[in-house]
Image (cartoon, coloured by chain):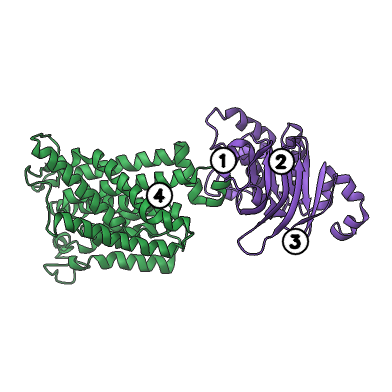
Chain colours: A green, B purple
C-alpha cells in the first residue's frame, strides 16, 4: 500500500503539476499560432518574465510588512498577470506588429521571437543576475499531508501548497478560457479568425482587436504558469526557456491552433515525462517473488537529467505519424 | 444617387492592374450581375470594393459617401456584405456560430435576424449545432449567405454563389437572391451561369480584360446577339 501512495505522490501528483504548467504554456503558444500563424519561440521567456514580475510585487508587499495566509507569490498573481499582459502587448507592438504590417512570412516572425527570447533573458539577467530566487525566503512553504485511512498505509499523500494552488488555478483558467471561447462575442471572433482569417475580416470582425486580446490572454496565462512553476521549484532566468520544447511538443500533439488540444497535450507530456523518470522498482518490489528478473535499485525509463528527450521523442513521433496532432489542428 | 457606384475603377495586386476602368452603378432595387470570361476581373471587382486589394485609380461611392479602399471592418457596419466564392464558412464553428459571426459588428439584439435567416433556409435550422464544415456544398452556400445577411446589409455582394452546386441548389440560391432583393437589399453578384443569372438581373455588366464591354438590363444583354455569341455560348 505504501508503494502505491509513493507512486501517487511521485508520479500522479508530479504529472498533474508538470502537466498544468505545460498546459498553460501550450495554450498560449497554440492561441498565438492560431491567430498569428507563427511559432512564438519567446513564450517560455514570457513565462519566466511573469515569474519575475510576481517576485518583484511579492517582495514589495513583504517589504511593506503585509502578510497573508497564502503564499505571497500567489496573492500578487492577478496584478502580475495584468502587468505581464501589458508587456506581451508591448512586445507585439514593438517587435511583431511592424513585421506583420510589412507582410512578413511566419518564419521571419519566428526568428524575431528568438531575438525577443534573447532580449528578455538578457534583461532579466541585467536586473536580477544569474542566481536563483525563491518566493519562500520570508515565509515557509507549506506541505499538505493527507493520511490514507487504509490498513497498512503509513505514508501520507503529500504535496505542497503551491502545487495544490497551481492545479486549482489551472482548472479555473481552463474553465474561464472555455467560457470565453464558446460564449463571448470576442472569444468566438477569436475562433473565427483562427479558423479562417480572410473570412473573419470580410465578416467585419475587428482583427486587430482579436490580436490584442490574444496577446493579453497568452501573456496572462504565461505569467500564471511561470509564477506557479517558480513557486513549485525556484525562479531563475532560464526557468521556462528549458521547457519550451515540451510546451511546443504539447501544442503540436494537441493540434496547433486547438486550445483544448494544447491542454490535453500538456497533460500527456507532463505525465509522460514524470512516468519516464519515475523509479519503477519501488512499485515492482512487492511482486519480486513472482517476477523472473531481479529488480535493480533504480529502474527508470529515462534518467531525470535526460527527461527532455521524452518531449523530443513525442514531438518527433507526432510529426512523423500524425502531424496535425490528436485534435487535427493547422499543420505547417 | 445610386446605392453603389464604381467610377473608372483601376485596381490590382501590385503588378499590372487587373481592372482598367470598371463602371458599375446599382440601386437598392437592383440585382446587378457581372458576367464575362475567366480572368476578366469579375471577382476582382468585388474584392476591390471590399478593400481586399488596392484601388489605384477611380472611386467607389456607397450612398454618396466615398468608400474607396475602406477596410472590411468599416464597410460592414455601413451596410455592405460580401460572400466570397470559396472558403466562405468557418468550418470548425457551428452553423449558429457562423451566423453570429456575421453579426459581429452589431451590438443590438440579433435574435430576430437569426429567426429570419432560419425561416429563409429551413435546412440550416435543423443543423444549427453542427459544424459548418460537415455540411454539403449547397448548405454551406446557405450558411455563407446567411452569415452575410446577419449584419442587415443594404448591399449584398455574392461571388459566384452557384459555383459547384447542383441545379436544384442553384435554383434555390437564385430564388433566395430574388427574395432578398425584394426585401430591399441591393444585390451585386458575379456569375458563371450567365444565362440563368441574367434572366432575373435588372442590370447586367459584361467585363472583358478589366473593362466594361456591354452594359444593359439583363434582358437586353440576353437579346444582344454579340453578347450571346461571345459570352453565352451562342
Q: Which mark is residue B4?
A: 2
Q: Position of residue A124 (x, y in %)?
A: 20, 56
**CA gap, disc 4 and disc 3:** 41 Å
Q: Mark 4 = which residue? A: A259
Pinpoint the chain carrying mark 1: B
The quadrant the N terminus of chain B occupies is top right
Q: Which mark is residue A100?
A: none
Disc 3 or disc 1, which is closer to the eye? 1
Label 4: state its secondary structure.
helix
Judge left or right: residue A128 versus residue A261.
left
The quadrant the C terminus of chain B occupies is bottom right
Disc 4 or disc 2, which is closer to the eye? 2
Q: Residue at x 77, y 54 (%)?
A: B192
Label 1: state its secondary structure.
helix
**CA gap, disc 4 and disc 1:** 30 Å
**CA gap, disc 3 and disc 1:** 30 Å
Q: Are marks 3 and 1 on the same chain?
A: yes
Q: Mark 1 = which residue? A: B74
Q: Earlier in the sequence, mark 2 or mark 3?
A: 2
Label 2: state its secondary structure.
strand
Pinpoint the chain carrying mark 3: B
Amino acid at each position: 500500500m505504501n508503494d502505491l501512495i509513493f507512486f501517487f505522490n511521485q508520479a500522479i501528483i508530479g504529472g498533474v503539476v508538470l502537466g498544468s504548467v505545460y498546459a498553460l504554456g501550450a495554450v498560449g503558444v497554440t492561441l498565438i499560432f492560431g491567430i498569428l500563424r507563427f511559432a512564438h519561440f519567446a513564450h517560455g521567456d514570457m513565462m519566466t518574465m511573469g515569474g519575475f514580475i510576481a517576485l518583484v510585487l511579492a517582495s514589495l508587499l513583504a517589504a511593506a510588512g503585509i502578510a497573508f495566509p497564502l503564499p505571497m507569490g500567489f496573492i500578487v498573481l492577478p496584478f502580475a498577470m495584468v502587468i505581464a499582459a501589458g508587456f506581451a502587448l508591448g512586445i507585439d507592438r514593438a517587435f511583431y506588429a511592424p513585421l506583420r504590417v510589412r507582410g512578413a512570412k511566419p518564419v521571419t516572425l519566428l526568428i524575431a521571437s528568438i531575438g525577443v527570447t534573447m532580449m528578455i533573458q538578457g534583461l532579466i539577467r541585467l536586473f536580477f543576475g544569474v542566481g536563483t530566487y525563491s518566493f519562500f525566503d520570508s515565509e515557509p512553504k507549506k506541505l499538505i499531508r493527507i493520511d490514507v485511512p487504509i490498513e497498512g498505509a503509513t505514508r501520507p499523500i503529500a504535496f505542497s501548497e503551491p502545487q495544490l494552488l497551481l492545479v486549482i488555478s489551472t482548472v479555473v483558467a481552463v474553465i474561464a478560457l472555455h467560457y470565453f471561447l464558446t460564449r463571448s462575442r470576442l472569444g468566438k471572433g477569436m475562433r473565427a479568425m483562427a479558423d479562417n482569417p480572410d473570412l473573419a475580416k470580410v465578416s467585419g470582425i475587428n482583427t486587430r482587436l482579436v490580436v490584442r486580446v490574444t496577446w493579453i490572454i497568452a501573456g496572462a496565462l504565461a505569467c500564471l504558469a511561470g509564477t506557479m512553476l517558480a513557486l513549485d521549484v525556484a525562479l531563475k532566468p532560464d526557468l521556462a526557456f528549458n521547457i519550451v520544447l515540451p510546451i511546443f511538443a504539447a501544442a503540436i500533439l494537441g493540434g496547433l491552433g486547438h486550445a483544448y488540444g494544447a491542454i490535453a497535450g500538456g497533460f500527456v507530456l507532463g505525465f509522460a515525462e514524470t512516468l519516464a523518470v519515475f523509479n519503477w522498482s519501488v512499485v515492482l518490489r512487492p511482486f519480486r517473488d513472482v517476477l523472473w528478473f531481479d529488480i535493480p535499485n533504480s529502474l527508470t525509463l529515462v534518467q531525470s537529467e535526460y527527461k527532455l528527450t521524452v518531449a523530443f521523442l513525442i514531438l518527433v513521433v507526432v510529426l512523423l505519424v500524425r502531424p496535425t496532432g490528436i485534435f487535427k489542428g493547422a499543420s505547417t | 444617387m445610386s446605392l453603389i457606384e464604381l467610377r473608372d475603377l483601376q485596381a490590382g495586386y501590385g503588378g499590372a492592374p487587373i481592372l482598367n476602368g470598371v463602371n458599375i452603378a446599382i440601386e437598392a432595387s437592383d440585382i446587378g450581375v457581372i458576367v464575362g470570361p475567366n480572368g476578366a476581373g469579375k471577382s476582382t471587382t468585388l474584392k476591390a470594393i471590399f478593400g481586399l486589394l488596392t484601388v489605384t485609380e477611380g472611386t467607389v461611392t456607397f450612398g454618396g459617401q466615398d468608400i474607396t479602399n475602406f477596410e472590411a471592418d468599416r464597410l460592414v457596419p455601413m451596410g455592405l456584405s460580401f460572400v466570397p466564392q470559396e472558403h466562405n464558412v468557418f468550418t470548425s464553428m457551428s452553423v449558429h456560430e457562423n451566423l453570429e459571426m456575421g453579426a459581429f459588428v452589431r451590438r443590438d439584439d440579433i435574435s430576430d435576424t437569426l429567426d429570419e435567416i432560419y425561416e429563409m433556409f429551413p435546412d440550416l435550422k435543423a443543423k444549427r449545432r453542427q459544424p459548418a464544415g460537415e455540411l454539403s456544398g449547397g448548405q454551406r452556400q446557405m450558411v455563407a449567405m446567411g452569415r452575410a445577411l446577419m449584419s442587415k446589409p443594404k448591399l449584398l455582394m455574392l461571388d459566384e454563389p452557384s459555383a459547384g452546386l447542383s441545379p436544384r441548389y442553384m435554383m434555390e440560391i437564385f430564388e433566395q437572391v430574388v427574395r432578398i432583393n425584394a426585401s430591399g437589399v441591393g444585390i451585386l453578384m458575379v456569375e458563371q451561369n450567365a444565362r440563368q443569372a441574367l434572366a432575373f438581373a435588372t442590370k447586367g455588366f459584361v467585363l472583358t480584360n478589366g473593362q466594361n464591354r456591354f452594359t444593359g438590363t439583363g434582358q437586353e444583354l440576353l437579346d444582344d446577339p454579340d453578347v450571346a455569341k461571345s459570352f453565352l455560348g451562342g
